[in-house]
Image (cartoon, helix red, strand yellow):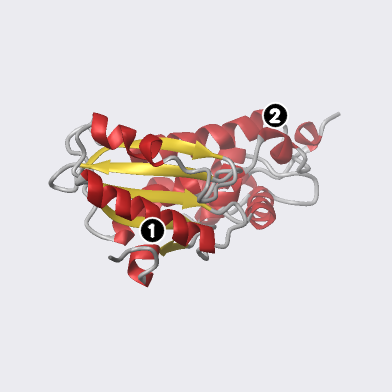
């Protein structure tokens, strides 16, 4: 018999005032903690551990919602009480949240600061298992045109082909771009190669008359703007 079939600790075992579903209904989802939202998805705990404790354990194990987003099904189902059905529910819910963030039916998002760009990219890029470089294409009003995924794998200055990097910007007639790449280690500190790549991209942008507004390095819930630090941007 699986751990899921043995569980007896349900949300209904809590006093009504402590039940996440009832609190969501009364006060709204935004008032619930992360573990309470997860508890609603999980529904039941395991023997010796109620559903809130199970959710808290998941968040601690994977380093919060970002870690859960990054975890694969095998990693999730290795946790006692998390079978394939629960793992799939968690992954589906996190993916829905990610897709909702990207939907802009009425107006394309505008980028006016490094914080704006980081907020748009952080959730998705911090969950990547490999290093990737993305190019954010912007129009003359700094509104998003699209995001090009140009490289995947370990990056260094000798690997980055500038023609490939600017291809989407030229094709879409972008006025400016923002470069972003992630550090799967979680530490967004720029490396010497990051600075060298930035310098080459910035100089190429000047020749092509495409403004390179910034280069962001995304870590685990942290990010660095090379433009703000004055790294790679200059004459």
Residue 169 to residue 9: above or below: above
> Please, what secondary structure does the residue beneath circle 2 have?
helix
N-terminal of the pair, mark 2 or mark 1, is 2
The residue at 46%/44% (across/down) is 133
Q: In this view, does 117 lie to the left or right of 41?
A: left
> Please, what secondary structure does the residue beneath circle 1 have?
helix
Residue 74 lies, in percent from the top left, at: 73, 34
* Alpha carbon separation for disc pair 2 and 1: 46 Å
Q: Please say whether residue 31 is visible from this viewpoint.
A: no
Tally of numbered discs: 2
Q: Mark 2 points at which residue?
A: 84
Q: Residue furthest bottom?
A: 229
Q: Is residue 8 left or right of residue 104?
A: right
**Neighbourhood count class around disc 2 (C-alpha, 10 Å): few under 14, some 14–19, many 20 upward:** some
Which of the 4 image quadrants contains residue 6? top right
The residue at 55%/43% (across/down) is 128
Disc marking residue 199 = 1
The residue at 40%/48% (across/down) is 121
Which of the 4 image quadrants contains residue 223? bottom left
Residue 151 to residue 49: above or below: above
CB-based contact (under 8 Å), mark 2 and mark 1: no
Q: Please say whether residue 105 is visible from this viewpoint.
A: yes
- Given residues 30 and 147, the one toward you in this image is 147
The residue at 52%/43% (across/down) is 159
Residue 110 lies, in percent from the top left, at: 21, 48
Query: Which-is-in-front pick, marks 2 and 1?
Result: 1
- Given residues 176 and 206, the one toward you in this image is 206
């Amino acid at each position: 018999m699986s751990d899921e079939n043995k569980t007896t600790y349900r949300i209904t075992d809590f006093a009504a005032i402590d039940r996440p579903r009832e609190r969501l209904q009364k006060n709204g989802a935004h008032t619930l903690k992360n573990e309470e939202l997860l508890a609603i998805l999980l529904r039941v705990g395991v023997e010796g551990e109620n559903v809130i404790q199970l959710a808290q354990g998941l968040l601690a194990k994977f380093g919060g919602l970002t870690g859960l987003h990054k975890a694969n099904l095998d990693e999730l189902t290795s946790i006692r009480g998390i079978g394939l059905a629960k793992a799939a529910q968690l992954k589906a819910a996190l993916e829905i949240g990610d897709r909702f963030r990207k939907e802009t039916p009425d107006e394309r998002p505008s980028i006016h600061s490094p914080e704006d760009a980081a907020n748009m990219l952080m959730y998705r890029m911090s969950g990547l298992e490999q290093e990737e470089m993305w190019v954010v294409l912007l129009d003359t009003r700094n509104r998003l045109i699209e995001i090009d995924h140009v490289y995947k794998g370990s990056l260094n200055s000798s690997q980055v082909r500038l023609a490939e990097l600017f291809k989407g910007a030229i094709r879409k007639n972008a006025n400016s771009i923002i470069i972003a790449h992630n550090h799967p280690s979680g530490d967004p500190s720029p490396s010497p190669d990051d600075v060298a790549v930035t310098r080459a991209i910035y100089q190429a942008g000047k020749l092509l008359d495409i403004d390179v507004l910034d280069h962001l390095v995304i870590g685990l819930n942290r990010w660095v703007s090379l433009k703000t630090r004055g790294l790679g941007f200059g004459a």
